[in-house]
Structure formats: structure tokens, C-alpha cells
């Protein structure tokens, strides 16, 4: 049983996988084109807010031990509300991961498989998802512990190997397009921390529930550092990315790595690491979606669900007609989904549940005092 | 029985994947590609450009490594570099590949008119590396390529690669790459620069 539980480091790596999978695609371009030279300052600002939110989530979960957001929604709104919330989160996980898978596969197709139909590239990822989840769904989470540190190291490596090409002056003007754009409109950048969504489902899966505080804060801090390193690398090397949008900006940055004339073209190694991270990301998404579905429907055997969810991911991934549509989803709709579902809906449920619990405790206390007094008077 | 059906199913999936990916494998195979070493862009009539591609024939395995291979320059007239690549792919047996393109040469005449369209095309091409050097030639770009006959170096690709390396110990040539050029081109406070070369025209 304990083999199905997640350890502290595994949980931290799990949150990081989500962010790494997104930064490989259009997210850095979006940040750089919106905030320009103030991107790093904006990320620091948003990171502080994200750490505060993760601490708030920990505090709100404290009153509900061994419960995730689905169980909590059942306590406040009954079975119907629980089902609605469950389906909202399943839809969010499946749709966002499918479209992001599509974008990633488009990049792979452009770079290495120009003659292969995109459906077959997506199909390969889906096959890996089915195999891993059928054997042991937790194996992807354990694999993360090996892959994510390599991915993190690759970004640090990218930063230091490109340091000779850096123009640090590109950080100026420090406020980019102004205070309002950086700090007021810039709050929407909180969508970079999409991994927060998985914090809502972690408590019942953890080996040691007391480590939830550590997990939520360390994972968000590590995510912030990773994002700052990534954006700093791109900001210091390139002027801006609005003019080159076909492939991932991080991939373009890897093409600049050269050690003389002997050691060149390292981008394939980076792509290999990202492919592995992506496979783990899909497995995690599938595992969490199946867990939620199992909770809603109370199905005892979840093995047949793996095929269903895999086909669902495949179907949604091949749905967009072209790269422009799937990229529009990633840059325009996905951030709004994170803010709406993960931050507003998720936090709203937790805050409401805590208020309801507090009210219930107060009522119980009042009833107890009333009963005690009644007994005293009768006695 | 179930296991038997499952094995057949797995076998079919493997076959489908192999056949799906084989087309990409064969299109990116070294036997089907021609590697361009340099691209030259000149002006032409009717708002068109003359694009010259400099490549070498692959060395046959039986020939010795010291044997010099004669370079080939093919020129087409087109409205853009992308069209020129399509045109040349149309009549040449092998597909052009720019992943080993070391130098992009523009004639002074075309550089004076502006080369931002060409730079945008090249930087968005995933095959072109950001480390490829940009040269502005005082003479015709094709003529400049024809005149490159390295005496010490047998391999032309090596010569092109080492061309800008001298910037590390000589002050006459800068290491002007297309990556830096593009960065400076879209930066509001920067000026792009390239290597200026001259070959005496006949």
C-alpha cells in the first residue's frame, strides 16, 4: 500500500514536471513579449505571490487531514457538487495536457520528422502513457526523481554555457513597459505556476502528510528559480522572441551552445531530456485524472480507465486543425483556465469549506455550552 | 488466446509506427540530401533575387581523404530564398539541406537595398544554424563563391568554418553570425554588422 504513496521529493519533482513541460513550449515567449525587460522582476513578484498562495493552500488543508479538494467539495456541497468539481478538474487536466502535447509534437515534427503524420508522434506518447499506467502508475512519479533533476541541470547548463553571449543590459529599463504593466497586469503571470493544481490532490497520496507544508513551499520556490533561470537565459541572449515563433525559444537557445568546432549541436540531447519530461508529465496527468474519476464514480478497478483516458488525450490532441490554433489555446486560454479553475475555484472551495467548518465548530461549542447549562439547571 | 491476440495487436502497432516514421527517416537520410555549404544572394531584374547554392559532391568511399573535391555552384532566380530552395529542389535529384551552411553571402548591392526579409526567412528556417556567418561582398556573391579556392585546406566546409575563427586572433574580421545579426536587427538600440570581403572582379 505504501508503495502507491508519494514521498516528499517525488511530490516536489511532480510539481516541477508540470512547469518544465510548459516552459519547453510557448510560455517563455509569452512572458518575454508581454513584459519585455521587466520579465525577471515580474517573475520575482509573481513568485512571491505564488509562495503565499501555496502557504495559504497548506493552511486551508490543515483542517481537512487526508482529504483532497474532491472530498472537501463533497463536505460543503454534497455529491452533486463533488461530481461537478471533479469533472471540471478532469476536463482541465485532460484538455490542457492534450493541447500542450499537440504543441510539443508539432515542434518535434518540424525539427526531426517532417514527413511523419503528427498523429503518429502523438500516438507514441499515448502508448508510453498506457504502458506505464498499466504496469504501475507510480513508476512515472518515481522516474521523475531522475529526469527532473537532469532537466533542471540542463537549464542551469544552458544558462552558464551561453553566458558569453549574454547582454545583461537587456534587463533595462527595469520596469519594462511601466509599473502598471509589470505589477498590476503582471499578476496574470501567476498562470506560470499551473503546478499548484496538483497540490489540491496531493494530501491523501502522501506517505507523510506532515510534509505537505514542505512540499507546497519548496516546490513553488524551486519552480520560481527554474522560471527565473529560463527567462534570464532567453532575455539576456535574444532581443525579443515575438518575431520567431515557430519553435520553442529554449530549443533555439540550445542551438547557440558551442565548444569550439568539436562540440556542437547539443540541442538533440536537450530535446531527449524534454521528451522524457513530457512523457512523465502525461503519465502524471493521466494518473491524477483517473484518481479523480475513481473518486467520483467509486470504481474499484481503474485499469480499464487508462485506455479511455489515453484515447481521450489522443482525440483532443489531434482536434486542432493546425499549430496556430493549438498555440492560441496555450497562450490565450490556458492562463485563463489556471487563474479561473486553479486559483479562483480551487481556493474558493477551500476558503468556503474552512468557513463552514469554523461555523460548524462554533455551533457545536454553543450547543455544548447550552446543554451543559441546561444540565446544571436541571441538576 | 487473449495473450495471442494481444501479441498480434502489439505487432501491428509496431508495424504501423515503423511505416509512419520510415518516410521521415528516408527523407533525412544522408543518401537523399545535398548539404549546402554557402548561400549567395545577388540582385536580379524585376525585383527578384539570384540565389546561389555552394555545395560539394559527397566523397566516394574509395577516394583518399587528401583528394580535392570540386565545388558546385547552382544559381536560380526567384522572388525569395524559400522560392529559390523550392526551385532548386525541383530539378535537383537530392533535397537541399541547410544544416551545414556555414556562410551566407550578400552582394553589396542587395545589402544596400536591405536584407531583413532574407534574414527573417533564414532565421526561421530550423536547418540554418545561428552560428552561420554573414558576409557582404563588394563583388557579385556568386563570383565571390567561385573565387574561393583554399590552397591549404582540402575540405571547403572546413575552410568556411574556420573563416571567421581568425577573428579570435586577428582584428580584421569580426565573428558576425546570423544569430547576432538578427538580434541586432530587431533591437531598437543596436546596429547589425557583417563581414565585408572583396574579391577582384574580372
Image (cartoon, rainbow, N blue to C red):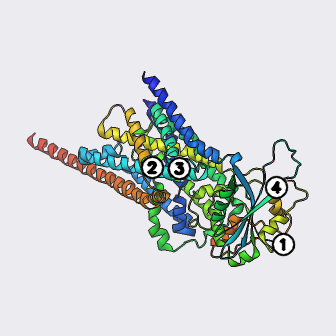
> Which chain is indicated by disc 4?
B
Q: Which residue is mark 4?
A: B158
Using the image as rendered, state which of residue B57 and residue A151 is in the foreground: B57
Label pair 3/1, CB-CB below 8 angstroms: no
Are labels 1 and 2 assigned to the same chain? no
- Which label number is shown at residue A105? 3
Using the image as rendered, state which of residue A356 and residue A111 is in the foreground: A111
Whether residue A13 can be seen here: no
Question: In this rendering, is residue A149 above or below A260?
Answer: above
Q: Quadrant of the N terminus of chain A?
A: top left
Q: Position of residue B109 (x, y in %)?
A: 74, 77
Within 10 Å of disc 2 (Cα), the crowding (few <14, some 14-19, many 20+) is: some
Q: Which residue is mark 2?
A: A318
Name which of mark 3 and mark 2 comes first in the sequence: 3
> Which chain is indicated by disc 3?
A
Outermost residue toward the right in this view = B151
- Left or right of B186 in this view: A318: left
Q: How far is mark 3 from mark 1, CA to CA? A: 45 Å
Which label sits in the foreground, 3 or 2? Answer: 2
Q: Which residue is mark 1?
A: B198
Q: Quadrant of residue B181?
A: bottom right
Q: Position of residue B193 (x, y in %)?
A: 73, 72
> Which chain is indicated by disc 1?
B
Amino acid at each position: 500500500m505504501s508503495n502507491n504513496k508519494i514521498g516528499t521529493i517525488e511530490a516536489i519533482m511532480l510539481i516541477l514536471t508540470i512547469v518544465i513541460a510548459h516552459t519547453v513550449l510557448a510560455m517563455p515567449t509569452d512572458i518575454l513579449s508581454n513584459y519585455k525587460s521587466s520579465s525577471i522582476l515580474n517573475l520575482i513578484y509573481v513568485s512571491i505571490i505564488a509562495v503565499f498562495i501555496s502557504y495559504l493552500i497548506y493552511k486551508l488543508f490543515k483542517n481537512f487531514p487526508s482529504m483532497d479538494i474532491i472530498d472537501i467539495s463533497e463536505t460543503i456541497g454534497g455529491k452533486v457538487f463533488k461530481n461537478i468539481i471533479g469533472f471540471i478538474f478532469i476536463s482541465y487536466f485532460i484538455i490542457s495536457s492534450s493541447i500542450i502535447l499537440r504543441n510539443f509534437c508539432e515542434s518535434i515534427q518540424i525539427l526531426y520528422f517532417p514527413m511523419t503524420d503528427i498523429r503518429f508522434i502523438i500516438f507514441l506518447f499515448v502508448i508510453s502513457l498506457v504502458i506505464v499506467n498499466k504496469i504501475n502508475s507510480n513508476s512515472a512519479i518515481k522516474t521523475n526523481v531522475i529526469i527532473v533533476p537532469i532537466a533542471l541541470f540542463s537549464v542551469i547548463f544552458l544558462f552558464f554555457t551561453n553566458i558569453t553571449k549574454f547582454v545583461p543590459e537587456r534587463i533595462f529599463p527595469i520596469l519594462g513597459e511601466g509599473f502598471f504593466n509589470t505589477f498590476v497586469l503582471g499578476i496574470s503571470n501567476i498562470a506560470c505556476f499551473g503546478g499548484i493544481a496538483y497540490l489540491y490532490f496531493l494530501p491523501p497520496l502522501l506517505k507523510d502528510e506532515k510534509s505537505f507544508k514542505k512540499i507546497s513551499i519548496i516546490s513553488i520556490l524551486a519552480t520560481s528559480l527554474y522560471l527565473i533561470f529560463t527567462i534570464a537565459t532567453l532575455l539576456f541572449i535574444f532581443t525579443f522572441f515575438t518575431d520567431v515563433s515557430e519553435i520553442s525559444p529554449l530549443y533555439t537557445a540550445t542551438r547557440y551552445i558551442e565548444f569550439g568546432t568539436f562540440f556542437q549541436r547539443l540541442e538533440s540531447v536537450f530535446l531527449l531530456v524534454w521528451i522524457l519530461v513530457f512523457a512523465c508529465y502525461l503519465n502524471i496527468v493521466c494518473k491524477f485524472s483517473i484518481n479523480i474519476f475513481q473518486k467520483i464514480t467509486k470504481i474499484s478497478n481503474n485499469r480499464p480507465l487508462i485506455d479511455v483516458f489515453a484515447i481521450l488525450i489522443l482525440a483532443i490532441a489531434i482536434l486542432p486543425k493546425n499549430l496556430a490554433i493549438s498555440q492560441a489555446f496555450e497562450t490565450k486560454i490556458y492562463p485563463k483556465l489556471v487563474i479561473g479553475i486553479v486559483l479562483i475555484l480551487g481556493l474558493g472551495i477551500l476558503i468556503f469549506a474552512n468557513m463552514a467548518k469554523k461555523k460548524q465548530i462554533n455551533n457545536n461549542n454553543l450547543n455544548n455550552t447550552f446543554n451543559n447549562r441546561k444540565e446544571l439547571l436541571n441538576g | 488466446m487473449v495473450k495471442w491476440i494481444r501479441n498480434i495487436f502489439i505487432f501491428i502497432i509496431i508495424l504501423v509506427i515503423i511505416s509512419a516514421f520510415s518516410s521521415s527517416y528516408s527523407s533525412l537520410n544522408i543518401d537523399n540530401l545535398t548539404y549546402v555549404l554557402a548561400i549567395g544572394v545577388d540582385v536580379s531584374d524585376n525585383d527578384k533575387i539570384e540565389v546561389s547554392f555552394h555545395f560539394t559532391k559527397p566523397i566516394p568511399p574509395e577516394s583518399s581523404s587528401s583528394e580535392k573535391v570540386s565545388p558546385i555552384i547552382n544559381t536560380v532566380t526567384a522572388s525569395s530564398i524559400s522560392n529559390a530552395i523550392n526551385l532548386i529542389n525541383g530539378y535537383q535529384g537530392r533535397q537541399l539541406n541547410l544544416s551545414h551552411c556555414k556562410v551566407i553571402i550578400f552582394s553589396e548591392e542587395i545589402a544596400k537595398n536591405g536584407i531583413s526579409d532574407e534574414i527573417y526567412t533564414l532565421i526561421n528556417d530550423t536547418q540554418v544554424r545561428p552560428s552561420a556567418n554573414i558576409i557582404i561582398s563588394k563583388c557579385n556573391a556568386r563570383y565571390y563563391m567561385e573565387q574561393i579556392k583554399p590552397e591549404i585546406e582540402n575540405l571547403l566546409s572546413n575552410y568556411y568554418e574556420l573563416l571567421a575563427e581568425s577573428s579570435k586572433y586577428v582584428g580584421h574580421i569580426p565573428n558576425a553570425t546570423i544569430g547576432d545579426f538578427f538580434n541586432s536587427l530587431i533591437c531598437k538600440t543596436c546596429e547589425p554588422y557583417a563581414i565585408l570581403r572583396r574579391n577582384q572582379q574580372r
